[in-house]
Amino acid sequence: MDTDAYRTTTEIDVNSTVNQLEELYETISILASGSEALKKDVEGMNSGFVEHKNKLQSLAEDVSKVKLSVERDNTYLKETQSHLDILSQDLMLLAEKIDEMQHVSHDGTFTWKITNFQEKMSQ
């Protein structure tokens, strides 16, 4: 009878061990498939990261180009403003000359323009 009890105990131990190994195998299979899914996610994120990094570099280059263009435009505008100021002064001088020429008489009579006449008369 001891032999039967030993066989039964051994069979139960073997069956229990087999069941535990099957559960362990299922757990390992689930973890392996989860690990594969995570690996694919990481690869996808890495490719997305590389894509975003390249776009960021491209945008940084574009920003540099825009800054350079703005600096050139500002320089051009300053030069244009300087030229405009010079032209404005020249225009004012020409306007004064034209105003002076309008008071010139060709009939032999001299006419003087007296600026601030009222002020000078009150003194």
Image: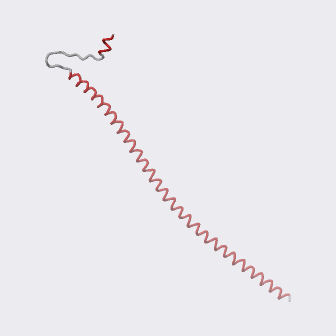
In the current view of this chain or complex, which residue is farthest to the right? 1
- Front-most of residues 77 and 56: 77
Q: Position of residue 30 (x, y in %)?
A: 64, 72
- Front-most of residues 7 and 89: 89
Residue located at (82% from left, 88% from top): 4
Can you say whether 99 is above or below 61 in the image?
above
Is residue 44 shown left or right of residue 66?
right
Q: Position of residue 93 (x, y in %)?
A: 27, 26
Residue located at (21% from left, 20% from top): 103
Scheme of image coloration = secondary structure
Residue located at (79% from left, 83% from top): 10
Give the total of numbered labels: 0
Q: Quadrant of residue 84?
A: top left
Q: Position of residue 9 (x, y in %)?
A: 80, 83
Can you say whether 123 is above or below 26 in the image?
above
Is residue 48 shown left or right of residue 91?
right
Is residue 123 shown left or right of residue 98?
right
Residue located at (31% from left, 15% from top): 118
Can you say whether 68 is above or below 13 in the image?
above
- Front-most of residues 94 and 99: 99
Q: Position of residue 122 (x, y in %)?
A: 33, 11
Q: Quadrant of residue 79?
A: top left
In the current view of this chain or complex, which residue is farthest to the top? 123
- Front-most of residues 13 and 90: 90
Image quarter in which the C terminus is found: top left
Image quarter in which the N terminus is found: bottom right
